[in-house]
DNA sequence: CACTAGTATGTTATATTATAACAATTATGT
DNA sequence: ACATAATTGTTATAATATAACATACTAGTG
């Protein structure tokens, strides 16, 4: 069992995760000629606070508490929509929550491993999963536009 | 491209889909020693009305309109929870909706192909998808408890 | 049968997630 | 400065889901 040790699962300098994510976001937005405003950057930063998916209303609460910014839901959802469009975050449908994309510079589908104990969520880029899904879709003559793969379980850190 | 033609995608006697589903449900509930009450059976029937996922509040509306049963949300959600537990339906997380399970007699994960034009949703049982997911989870030493695979696209009927 | 414990449903209220519609503000190019 | 488009603010509401407690039904026991 060739265990991989993704950053999210081991102690690490998370400040550099955040810094790197914000940096990549600047690059992506410049390339896409869209504006990464202060609000959008801040929301992205909040999403990146941990390797766990974060809900829109959690973001709203932090904005209120830490920024004194009494934003209404549309403010946050619009920022999230923007970040989703630019591929900077992914939405985890089964949790109604959002997580930073680990590789926003190339657009992709995210496959996720979600720990139901600690909440830490890994984003995978598995050719095998992708190929098997496309192959079966092809058998049914189905034209894929979007794939959602969310695998819930227990991460190595949380196993007894 | 060896196109499969699942029942849901071709004209068919849907009444027999429903009858068969309700019949299997009886079997499953007897085996599991749980009670398939009138309400639960009715909700299952409504979920099976089409091969498209159905929302809880849609069910509520039909119960009100056709059965004169002014049920409140908990009534429907409890029935749905029961049906989920018995493996008689699946929840489609990306749509907040429910669909009848095509093979409830053996417990399983459902993988879904969802047409974003007509809404028709196919349940797959693909060993390849399953194996690729389990393999990648194993690489990360992740213990899977539940997999969600929801593939959105255009079904053959809806392709131009 | 009467009693009881467990299961199921009814009912009211509320929590959580998300969007519509329109107003005000800010950035951008000329 | 001006016109335009993009962004954010604001208010209201839609859509999905659950908590908490009351009532009714079921199945077994004595
Ligand atoms: Zn980190
Ligand atoms: Zn990603
Ligand atoms: Zn049918
Ligand atoms: Zn199924």
Image (tube, coloured by chain):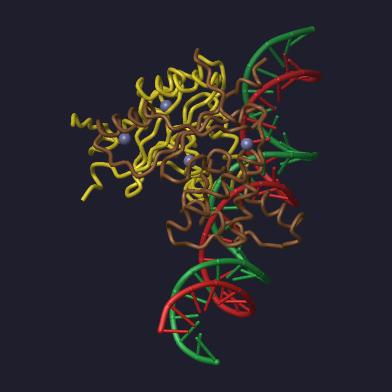
Chain colours: A brown, B yellow, C red, D green
Q: Does residue A22 show up?
A: yes
Locate residue C5 relative to residue B120 in the image: left or right: right
Which quadrant does ligand 4 occupy? top left
Above or below B76: residue B145 = above
Residue occupying image coordinates x 22% and y 30%: B4
Camera-side residue: A135 or A31?
A31
Asked which quadrant contains residue B130, the reply is: top left
Residue occupying image coordinates x 56% and y 29%: B82
Q: Does residue B72 show up?
A: no
Above or below A51: residue C6 = above
Locate residue B125 relative to residue B85 in the image: left or right: left
Camera-side residue: A140 or B52?
A140
Give the x, y percent position of residue B154: 30, 45
Locate residue B42 relative to residue A154 in the image: left or right: left
Give the x, y percent position of residue B52: 38, 41
Give the x, y percent position of residue A86: 46, 53
Above or below A83: residue D25 = above
Residue occupying image coordinates x 35% and y 36%: B113
Question: Residue at the left extreme?
Answer: B1
């Amino acid at each position: 069992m060739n265990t991989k040790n993704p950053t999210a699962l081991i102690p690490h300098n998370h400040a550099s995760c955040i810094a790197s994510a914000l940096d990549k976001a600047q690059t992506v937005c410049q390339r896409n000629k869209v504006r990464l405003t202060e609000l959008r950057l801040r929301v992205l930063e909040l999403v990146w606070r941990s390797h766990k998916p974060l809900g829109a209303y959690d973001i709203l609460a932090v904005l209120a508490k830490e920024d004194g910014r009494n934003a209404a839901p549309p403010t946050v959802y619009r920022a999230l929509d923007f970040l989703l469009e630019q591929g900077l975050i992914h939405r985890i449908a089964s949790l109604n929550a959002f997580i930073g994309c680990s590789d926003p510079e190339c657009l992709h589908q995210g496959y996720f491993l979600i720990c139901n104990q600690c909440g830490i969520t890994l984003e995978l880029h598995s050719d095998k999963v992708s190929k098997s899904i496309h192959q079966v879709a092809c058998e049914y003559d189905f034209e894929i536009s979007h794939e959602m793969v969310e695998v819930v379980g227990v991460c190595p850190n949380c196993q007894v």
